[in-house]
Amino acid sequence: MTPKKAILTSFVFGAIILVFSFTFIDPNLIFFANIAPLVDIQHFLFSFGRDHAVLNGLIFSLLLILWYPWVKSLLKLRLKTIIIVSLIISAFGIVTYPAFSHDLFNYIFNAKILTIYHQNPAQVSPFSFVNQDDWVRFMHNTKAISPYGLAWRYISAVGFYLFYSISPSFLSAFIGLKLVNFISFWIAFYFIYLCLKLLQIKDIKTRLTFFLLNPLILWEGLYMAHNDMLMATFAIISFYFLVKAKQAGQPSAKQTNLLLTAFFLALSIATKYATIVLIPVYIWYLIKPKLDISLYATLALFLTAFARWPWLHSWYFIWPISFFVLNKNLKIIKFFWIFSFFLMIRYLPFAIQRSWSLYHFREVILLLGIPISIAIINKTLKRFNSLKLKHAF
């Protein structure tokens, strides 16, 4: 594939995902208020998704199936081109509707409670404003208070208010919160790159591609804008300073880097708590000279995600998948790359039925995804080794 074709296909993928996402829009939400042609398109897409649910499910499946060979073809290109492709795909995410989750709406309204109503979203639920705010109409879990930490509360409030204060509309607030995740994603990429350089890990282009174009990271972190993306970003930054502290020669430099490690890990924990499991891993890394910190950090976050069983959502795996490209063992990277497909295909029943009535299907797919991913990796490696032996003779 040429760079021009890669960039063109990234626009095609981004546009299809954007249009597809609006087939799931809540009918109570007028996304493009006062823009009549766009309102008509919104109603058409909602009707299409409702009336052609099976076709919609097939479109989603086809997107996933085509995604993997497309990314594989991009590996032949320069990293610069791959970054441009990811930038285009992720930019579409700023206005893509969060098709499979309503969490973004809760983030937006919680930010509104804090900045506009001057109340604490950790104490006051959106339902308290049901008689004075139309936005409550298209929210879910309206009686739930915000369960997230202080870091997320105030960072999301900044993203919300910067745009809402300029143009007080839902679309402005939506874009403000989406940009928080967009910026988080690219900061995470930058620090992953720095970590790979610092750890002197080979195959940097392959690893960065698997992060930049991982379907789970893009869909859950950018399109549906879960705050797990910000939590993972702070954790990656803390990881970078931890490795710098371990390699520092001067005691003052080591101390500074350890303080920065603690600071960013604290921000990560104060976003969504899950990364608290990294504390013992980090301490162990400082004690044991040759510990494969990337592997144990990935494993700790992977097992933590399963702690939420049976309420195990695919976006929880943003936690380990953000770290997986830092692993020295390519098998781990290939496992999570393939496993991401199964985490995404869990949405297929919802794409068709618009409900979680087949909830247990998600769990079956998840459990089958682990051994199938391992089997595919082993089969690929055996085939590769047999080809090497064949050419050797």
Image (cartoon, helix red, strand yellow):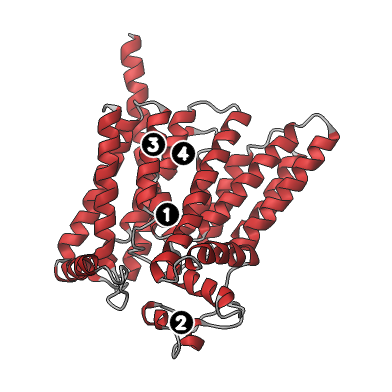
Q: Position of residue 190 (x, y in %)?
A: 54, 39
Dot placed on the residue nearer the N-terminal end, 1 or 3:
3
Considering only vertical position in the picture, is 296 above or below 134? above
Nearer the camera: disc 4 or disc 1: 1
Dot placed on the residue nearer the N-terminal end, 2 or 4:
2
Dot placed on the residue nearer the N-terminal end, 2 or 1:
2
- Residue 84, numbered label: 3
Element type at mark 2: loop
Residue bearing the label numbered 1:
222
Q: CA distance from mark 2 to mark 4?
A: 39 Å
- Residue 142, numbered label: 2
Q: CA distance from mark 3 to mark 4?
A: 22 Å
Decide if residue 60 is on the left or right side of residue 276.
Answer: left
Residue drawn at (44%, 67%) of the image: 167
Quadrant, the C terminus: top left
- Tag 2 near tag 1, CB within 8 Å: no
Going by the numbered disc 3, the residue's amino acid type is Ile
Nearer to us in this view, 173 or 318 = 173
Residue bearing the label numbered 4:
333
- Tag 3 near tag 4, CB within 8 Å: no
Q: CA distance from mark 3 to mark 2?
A: 39 Å
Disc 3: CA contacts within 10 A as few (<14), some (14-19) or many (>=20): some
Going by the numbered disc 2, the residue's amino acid type is Thr
Residue drawn at (45%, 58%) of the image: 178
Dot placed on the residue nearer the N-terminal end, 4 or 1:
1
Element type at mark 1: helix
